[in-house]
Image: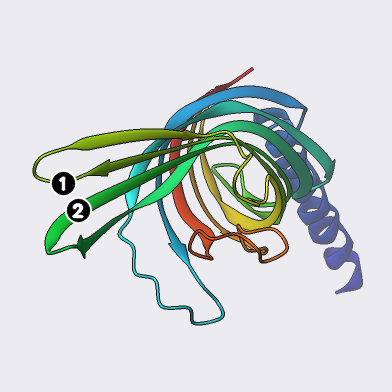
Amino acid sequence: MKNRFYPIAALLIFAFAAEAQETVVVYPERIHVGLKIGANYSNVYDAQGQSFIANPKLGFAAGAFLSIPIVPFIGIQPEVLFSQKGFQATGDILGATYNLTRTTNYIDVPLFITLKPVHMLTIMAGPQYSYLTKQTDVFATATTSIVQEQEFENDNLRKNTLCFAGGADINLQELVLSGRMGWDLLNNNGNGTSTTPRYKNAWYQFTIGIRF
């Protein structure tokens, strides 16, 4: 009985090793550089309950990423993105209805920890640093429209903020379909002296990319 067991065990070990080697050959893990482009669907929220209601808006997103495997199934992925966020709001002033659209341009730098359970799917999460480069407000009523570009001189807006982001990539050979969501961890109004509504950004991001 024992003599029959050894050849069977050896055959199973050989088959497992051959399958593992074939998997490595088919799906080699290596460093990838990539470019992506897409859109943000963003809004704002206030964790402290200040009365401020806003509606979501679309914005542009594009950048580059670097995928670095560390051990099997686990790696890191830093990214650098130009990312438009903001919100839309409607209200009444002196009996007239107005619409306000705020667009904020950020440079986002997330650092993701990645988990790759299968070759096609990458799951990720991690911190993100965001730097505000420009803010544009469009204030419109039935009779007038005013565009104001914020230069950060009259308001104590926070230009540097930390966020938490996460999402997943679907890997289709060189093509990468990405979905992300993120939340600011700090309010927009610096040390609290800003006269603008206090809020934090929240967004969904969808991009299509190519990796090399």
Q: How is the image coloured?
A: rainbow
Residue annotated with mark 1:
141
The quarter holding residue 169 reads top right
- Residue shown at the point (73%, 40%) measured from the top left: 77
Q: Which mark is residue 66?
A: none
SS under mark 1: loop
Q: Residues within 10 Å of mark 1 (few under 14, many from 20)?
A: some
Residue annotated with mark 2:
98
Q: Is residue 115 above or below residue 4?
A: above
- Give percent across and percent down for residue 101: 32, 46
- Give percent across and percent down for residue 71: 86, 46
Q: Is residue 20 left or right of residue 155?
A: right
Q: Name, please, the residue furthest toward the bottom.
A: 49
Q: Mark 2 belongs to which amino acid?
A: Tyr
Between marks 2 and 1, how big is the CA–CA gap? 5 Å
Q: Is residue 86 left or right of residue 69?
A: left
